[in-house]
């Protein structure tokens, strides 16, 4: 680390941390340091499915996502890297009338926010998912402007841009805690020494709970392990990201032709933080995929990998100042959708660091909503994987 | 529209007298000449088979409606529908090969295709039309019940029926254990006193779960697409080794092959589809290639000195030798026509007329299952690879997991012995002790410094470092220049190692290349995380096993 004092220390060089640092530097905030104990893209930002959607139950998330879609469309021009953001849509499948009803309620909210989602019949689904097993669905909902992107170039692009604005990124450095006096942050303790800073941003992804707790803050964030796989590449035949809420199945086809996706597999809690793959996931995912699209039976699974979601009790992220420790800013709790939201969410994170007013409804994403005696005002249940 | 001739079926591979007994599709095609059945994924460069082991992307065909099938892994059957793919009208002449010529320096998909913004959709459409190897699998009428899975439970499982695996199995029988031997070769395997699961590839060996009498589970598939699961108390991995690739200009051309393929194209000593081979390598593997190819060898070159018995054999055959040479370039387009060599440390160049280049310079351990199982690995150079830390009986750091033969880095003449020792360990001990045998000191490899010299070479065309994904040396250099360091990051930055071979071929080269580009020892450049499955495993095989694992708590 080049200095002993920074305007802000960002913990985690994932997409959220890097974007936050970039926005702070753009705003002329002063010296910014990003620390990461691993390698670039070693966290969730290098292990996700690249899905970008605006279909949510909660309005606050829809708005954030809509703004993020505009950001992703501009990303190439702004950052010089092509993320291949392809708007092939997100297709939510329903297996029963009740599920279809639920999707219709989401659809109504999404439409009322000005987005053109549509309800599909079984035939409508079959046209968009060539080869889907007859009778596998009763219909679904679809939004054509949702899509998928390549996560890696986004990480490189923001990393390059942040560094060229003077942000210092220290890889292989772990943040271990903070020094506080009278409820005010003084410094951040790292494996490479203690650095003074009035602000620390917790962008530690699946490890954010650990870092908050190391700073003495009791938070409800829990890390959950999620596995994902890619098949061998075949010529693209599938446009949308296909999602089934009942078992958390999701998959899309990348620009290279690989099918990438996952399914929910319950993991025994407290069994370490490695990134192994499990027979249960591999076989369960294969069964789900072949059951839904039988023509894929002979296709080979190329590789599987694992990452962590940073989950909150209400399924919504945590953005902003922690009321218990001045200078401790949360940019965490993104669950399975932190990548897509990062460009928009980090505008609010930067605003919080700079003490600016943010347009976010403070109640929904506020760290204060988990304090004793409070109840979270909303919940997002449309979760996957 | 009428199907253009070259896209029409390749034929079932039956010769005039009907199919030869148990012949692979690749062998059958090779009888009509060197089989150029594919074009590369990005630039549509001509490609041919490289490995013969089912790992590269050089023999992909559409087989009975399924894309990306490996010709070298399929035994010809009457009624097979075989087609070429990813080439129009066909692999010998492919109009899209123009991409290679139009973009001599490659296409930059990382930074390019961003402007103008309104063209985004068009770019996406064009790139998607070109993506993938084969077209998606043929649609089917309804749910296809896959073959019922095979589930086995045993005491000791031996993976691999090569010299060390067979020795281990025989020795286990001697210890009163009836082993289960899994082997992926396509021919019959016969082992007295053992149960054999043949034509089966183990692709996933998760770390053992210490509870219960059989902590290991192995997942794999039969060539027919049947899923296989095996539970065992102890595992002996005798998965052998493989011949590495090498980067030079034109190293991806049809005719540049691993020694492995030379032995598999014509296993019974038939005529190979080439007549003048340049053999690259100066050790025992090169010697074996000389024995197999005999008069079809035009010259032999090696990155370092050439061993005395190789020299002796070469002089018997009248083969000219080029010790301490860089292999700089393979000339020719749809077939190698000559090779350029340069004496190391000098500027003198030699040209050797040849129609094949057989790489026998570096043999690597087949270690992915060891990585998957969580065995502790150490870097050893030569040959420049990670080997398991082992005790004297081949016990790895994972209790109950033993390794024998080349996979464990045991010397070639020690294969049998290492198999027997591992068998003793697996039969008697639980293997729960610390592997302690000191790793032999890393002797300098003749490949150390090889890439430094090679990188200084003038380039006139594409140097493909990752043939599966058509990644160029320039892209790796650019990543390094931009400050992206370490194999994990360079892999994600360039896409190198993410293709069909899962990095088996390109990553060992990349470690040596990056060690020069990053100015640090190859082992500090990183560690290759080995993701399961080891080779593409049919979804249907995995799906059939879902019942077995559906309720299992995940560690
Ligand atoms: C399988 C899977 C699929 C997903 N699919 C999608 C999807 O389709 N769309 C989507 O938008 N999102 C998806 N996600 C979620 C998404 O990946 C994450 O929400 C997002 O990447 C979070 O970014 P981040 O920057 O907050 O965290 P990360 O990228 O995880 O970065 C956190 C970094 O912090 C570092 N760190 C942690 N603790 C410390 C410490 N104490 N000191 C120093 N460094 C530390 C870590 O090394 C890591 O690099 C998926 C996630 C997974 C696992
Ligand atoms: S030659 Fe068949 S996969 Fe390499």
Image (cartoon, coloured by chain):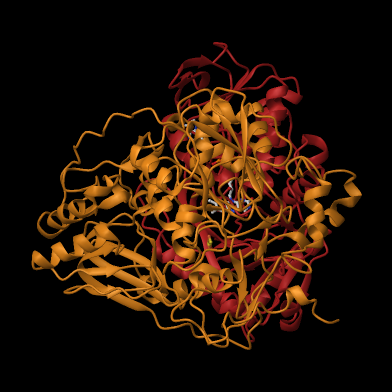
- Give the orange chain's letter: B
Residue drawn at x 75%, y 83% as measured from the top left: A123
Split into 4 quadrants, where in the image is the C terminus of chain B? bottom left
Q: Position of residue A342 (x, y in %)?
A: 67, 42
- Give the red chain's letter: A
Q: Position of residue B418 (x, y in %)?
A: 20, 51
Split into 4 quadrants, where in the image is the N terminus of chain B? bottom right
Closer-to-camera residue (B127/B167)? B167
Q: Position of residue A324 (x, y in %)?
A: 51, 30
Residue drawn at x 68%, y 32% as measured from the top left: B478
Task: Tell me: residue B6, above or below residue B281.
Answer: below
Residue A246: name its quadrant. Answer: bottom right
Is B313 on the left-hand or right-hand side of A150?
left
Task: Tell me: residue A27, above or below residue B206.
Answer: above
Asked whether residue B548 is in view, the answer is yes
Residue drawn at x 38%, y 27% as measured from the top left: B444
């Amino acid at each position: 680390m080049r200095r002993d004092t920074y305007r802000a220390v960002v913990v985690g060089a994932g997409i959220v941390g890097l974007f936050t640092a970039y926005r702070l530097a753009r705003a002329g905030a002063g010296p910014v340091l990003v620390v990461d104990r691993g390698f670039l893209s070693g966290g969730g930002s290098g292990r996700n499915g690249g899905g970008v959607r605006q279909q949510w139950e909660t309005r606050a998330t829809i708005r954030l996502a809509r703004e993020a879609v505009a950001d992703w469309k501009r990303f190439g021009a702004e950052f010089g890297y092509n993320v291949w953001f392809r708007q092939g849509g997100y297709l939510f499948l329903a297996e029963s009338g009740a599920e279809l009803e639920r999707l219709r309620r989401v659809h109504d909210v999404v439409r009322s926010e000005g987005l053109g989602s549509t309800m599909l019949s079984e035939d409508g689904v079959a046209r968009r998912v060539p080869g889907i097993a007859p009778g596998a669905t009763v219909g679904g909902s679809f939004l054509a402007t949702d899509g998928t992107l390549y996560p890696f170039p986004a990480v490189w692009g923001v990393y390059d841009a942040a560094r060229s604005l003077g942000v210092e990124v220290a890889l292989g450095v772990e943040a271990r805690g903070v020094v506080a006096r009278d409820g005010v942050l003084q410094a951040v303790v790292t494996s490479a020494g203690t650095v003074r800073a009035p602000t620390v941003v917790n962008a530690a992804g699946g490890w954010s709970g650990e870092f908050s707790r190391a700073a003495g803050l009791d938070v409800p964030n829990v890390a959950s392990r999620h596995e994902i796989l890619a098949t061998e590449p075949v010529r693209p035949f599938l446009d949308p990201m296909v999602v089934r809420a009942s078992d958390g199945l999701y998959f899309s086809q990348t620009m290279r032709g690989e099918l990438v996706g996952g399914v929910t597999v319950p993991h025994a809690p407290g069994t370490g933080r490695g990134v192994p793959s499990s027979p249960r996931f591999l076989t369960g995912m294969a069964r789900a995929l072949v059951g839904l699209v039988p023509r894929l039976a002979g296709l080979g699974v190329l590789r599987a990998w694992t990452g962590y979601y940073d989950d909150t009790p209400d399924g919504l992220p945590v953005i902003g100042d922690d009321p218990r420790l001045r200078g401790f800013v949360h940019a965490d709790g993104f669950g399975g959708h932190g990548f897509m939201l990062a460009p928009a969410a980090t505008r609010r994170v930067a605003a919080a660091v700079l003490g600016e007013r943010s347009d976010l409804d403070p109640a929904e994403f506020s760290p204060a909503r988990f304090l004793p005696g409070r109840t979270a005002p909303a919940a997002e249940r449309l979760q996957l994987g | 529209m009428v199907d253009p001739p070259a896209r029409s079926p390749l034929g079932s591979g039956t010769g005039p007298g009907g199919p030869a007994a148990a012949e692979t599709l690749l062998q059958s095609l090779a009888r009509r000449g060197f089989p150029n059945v594919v074009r590369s994924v990005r630039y549509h460069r001509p490609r041919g088979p490289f490995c013969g082991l089912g790992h590269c992307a050089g023999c992909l065909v559409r087989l009975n409606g399924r894309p990306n099938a490996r010709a070298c892994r399929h035994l010809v059957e009457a009624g097979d529908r075989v087609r070429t793919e990813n080439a129009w009208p066909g692999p010998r002449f492919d109009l899209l090969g123009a991409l290679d010529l139009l973009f001599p320096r490659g296409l930059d998909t990382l930074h390019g295709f961003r402007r103008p913004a309104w063209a985004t959709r068009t770019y996406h459409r064009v790139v998607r039309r070109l993506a993938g190897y084969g077209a998606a699998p043929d649609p089917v009428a309804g749910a296809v019940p896959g073959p019922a899975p095979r589930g086995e439970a045993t005491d000791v499982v031996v993976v691999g029926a090569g010299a060390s695996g067979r020795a281990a199995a025989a020795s286990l029988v001697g210890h009163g254990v009836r082993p289960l031997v899994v082997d992926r070769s396509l021919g019959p395997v016969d082992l007295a006193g053992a149960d054999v699961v043949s034509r089966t590839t183990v692709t996933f060996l998760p770390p053992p779960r210490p509870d219960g009498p059989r902590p290991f589970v192995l997942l794999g598939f039969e060539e027919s697409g049947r899923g296989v699961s095996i539970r065992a108390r102890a595992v002996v991995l005798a998965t052998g080794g493989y011949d590495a690739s090498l980067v030079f200009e034109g190293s991806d051309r049809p005719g540049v092959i691993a020694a492995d393929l030379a032995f598999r194209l014509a296993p019974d000593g038939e005529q190979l589809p080439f007549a003048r081979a340049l053999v690259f390598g100066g050790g025992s593997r090169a010697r074996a290639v000389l024995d197999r190819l005999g008069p079809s060898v035009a010259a032999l070159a090696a990155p370092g000195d050439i061993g005395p018995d190789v020299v002796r054999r070469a002089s018997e055959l009248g083969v000219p030798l080029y010790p301490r040479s860089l292999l700089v370039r393979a000339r020719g387009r749809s077939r190698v026509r000559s090779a350029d060599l340069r004496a190391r440390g000098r500027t003198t160049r030699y040209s050797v007329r040849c129609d094949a280049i057989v790489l026998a310079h570096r043999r690597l351990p087949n270690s992915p299952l060891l990585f998957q199982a969580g065995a502790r690995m150490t870097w050893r150079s030569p040959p420049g690879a990670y080997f398991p830390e082992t005790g004297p009986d081949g016990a790895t750091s994972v209790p109950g997991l033993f390794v024998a033969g080349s996979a464990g880095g045991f010397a070639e003449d020690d294969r049998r012995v290492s198999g027997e020792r591992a068998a003793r360990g697996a039969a008697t001990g639980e293997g729960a002790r610390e592997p302690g045998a000191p790793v032999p000191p890393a002797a300098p490899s003749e490949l150390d410094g090889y890439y430094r010299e090679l990188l200084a070479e003038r380039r006139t065309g594409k140097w493909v470092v990752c043939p599966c994904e058509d990644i160029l040396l320039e892209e790796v250099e650019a990543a390094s220049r931009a400050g992206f360091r370490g194999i994990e990051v360079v892999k994600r930055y360039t896409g190198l190692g993410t293709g069909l071979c899962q990095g088996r071929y390109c990553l060992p080269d990349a470690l040596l290349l990056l060690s020069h580009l990053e100015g640090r020892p190859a082992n500090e450049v990183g560690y290759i995380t080995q993701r399961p499955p080891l080779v593409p495993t049919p979804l249907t095989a995995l799906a059939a096993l879902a019942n077995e694992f559906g309720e299992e708590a995940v560690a």
